[in-house]
Image: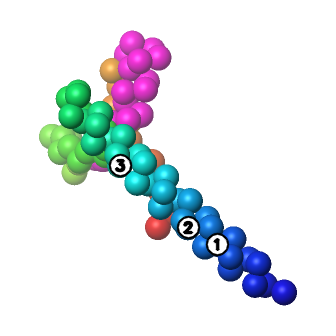
Amino acid sequence: MFEGIKGRQGEGARALEQFKSRVAAFEDVFRSLFTVTRLKSVFEREAASKGAVYDELLRYVHRCVSCKDILFDAPISQCT
């Protein structure tokens, strides 16, 4: 009864690996042509506090939309 589900999971895993390899190939070509910086969460220590973690991607998107440069706290991920 559940044999078909295992086959589908195998197909899904194979599709995911193919997608990841194509993205990696694209990244390699793109990096060879342009200067690339990966946006990530950054820990910054401030004088008034113990420090905070900011998300560079949220900051960049907000700056593009509103033209205001504001630090965004990194979201707390529920997925581990």
In reply to whether residue 50 is colored magenta, the answer given is no
Q: Could you tell whether 42 is left or right of 9 in the image?
A: left
Q: Is residue 18 above or below residue 59?
A: below
Question: Residue sitting at 49 percent across and 52 percent down?
Answer: 19
Q: Which mark is residue 48?
A: none
Q: Is residue 77 above or below residue 25?
A: below
> Residue 43 or 35: which is nearer the viewer?
35
Label whose residue precedes the other's in the sequence (2 or 3):
2
Residue at the outermost right position: 1
- Give the overall secondary structure of the magenta segment: helix
Label whose residue precedes the other's in the sequence (3 or 1):
1
- Circle 3 residue: 24
Considering the numbered disc 3 on the image, is that residue within a helix, a strand or a loop? Answer: helix
- Circle 1 residue: 9
Residue 54 in view, yes or no: no
First to last magenta residue range: 52-68
**Location of residue 45 in the rendering, given as x and y in whole percent from the top left corner:** 18, 45
Q: CA distance from mark 2 to mark 3?
A: 16 Å
Mark 1 surroundings: few (<14), some (14-19) or many (≥20) residues within 10 A: few
Residue 63 in view, yes or no: yes
Amino acid type assigned to the residue bearing label 1 in the image: Gln
- Circle 2 residue: 13
> Residue 49 or 60: which is nearer the viewer?
60
Mark 2 surroundings: few (<14), some (14-19) or many (≥20) residues within 10 A: few
Q: CA distance from mark 1 to mark 2?
A: 6 Å
Corner quadrant of residue 28: top left
**Location of residue 75 in the rendering, given as x and y in whole percent from the top left corner:** 45, 48
In reply to whether residue 55 is colored magenta, the answer given is yes
Amino acid type assigned to the residue bearing label 2 in the image: Ala
The number of callouts visible is: 3
> Residue 63 or 23: which is nearer the viewer?
23
